[in-house]
Amino acid sequence: MRKKESLGALIGFLALSVALLLSPSHAAQSKPMTIAELTLYKGTDREKILLEGAKKEGQVVFYTSNTWVAGPVSQEFEKKYPFVKTNVWRSDSKALLKRLTEEVTAGRTIADVVETSPEYMTLMLRDKMLQEHVSPELSAYDDEAKVKGKTGVYAWTNREIYISLGFNSKLIPPAEAPKSIKDYLDPKWKGKMSIAGTTTGIQWVGAMIDTMGREFLEKLAAQDINVQNISGAA
């Protein structure tokens, strides 16, 4: 049994292209364009160029902090494009940013597509890690979901989530479990609660300030909540 707080409108996750499945050699043979120009290309032969480049490369590298979507997305992608293997690397947002930063600094970017939380995407944009690009898929998204550039976009929100508050049913009978967020202020829960120290927890704290107010959050903090640095441990 879980008690859910509706935070979907407050939490957003972005998807972006760091590079597309294009080979420079192919681009040079087909059209005198750089990779940056190709990512913004809207010609009628756009898909043909992309598919031919993808067949030559044979794989796409996908970095994500979303553990439950990566598998299904990869499977559906490979069904549509069986000539491209999807290599997925999954970690939390902080580790993902660290790895991508190291790649960019070394001048050897392995990731093609990155999906992570908004605050880390903002840092990537600030440090010019993201490639501005266009896609026919963008027409399905509202303008407010897009991080726009001069011509295309750098990133866009592809989903929203709900953050759940759960309890250990082996230790707490359902009848005694908290029924609402306010129940967590009950002294009997002091020192018995945990929160993720990763992006999930940070976003939850921010959402609580917006929805419940700082005074409530300060009272909750007085409950001696343990901070776990991996989401699954909280």
Image (spheres, rainbow, N blue to C red):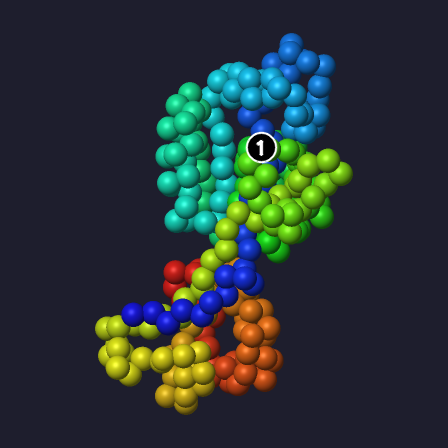
Residue 126, how many percent across, how many down? 71, 48
Rendered image quadrant of residue 108: top right
Q: Is residue 175 left or right of residue 111?
A: left
**Residue at figure coordinates x 68%, y 29% from the top left:** 40
Q: Which residue sits furthest top?
A: 29
Q: Is residue 50 above or below residue 166?
A: above
Q: Is residue 121 left or right of residue 4?
A: right
Q: In this view of the protein, which residue sits in the foreground, 100 or 7?
A: 7
Q: Is residue 159 left or right of residue 16?
A: left
Residue 127, how many percent across, how many down? 71, 45
Residue 223, how many percent across, how many down? 47, 83
Q: In this view of the protein, which residue sits in the foreground, 92 or 130?
A: 130
Residue 72, how many percent across, how many down? 37, 40
Structural crowding at the residue carrying mark 1, measured as other residues with C-alpha within 10 Å and reported as few (<14), some (14–19) or many (≥20): few
Q: Which amino acid lies under the numbered mark 1 shown in the image of this protein?
A: Pro
Q: Which residue sits furthest right?
A: 150
Q: Is residue 129 above or below residue 193?
A: above
Report which residue position mark 1 lands on: 136
**Residue at figure coordinates x 23%, y 73% from the top left:** 170
Residue 191 in view in this figure: no
Q: In this view of the protein, which residue sits in the foreground, 146 or 69?
A: 146
Residue 146 in view in this figure: yes
Q: Which residue sits furthest bottom?
A: 187
| Helix, strand or loop for disc 1 | helix
**Residue at figure coordinates x 26%, y 77% from the top left:** 174
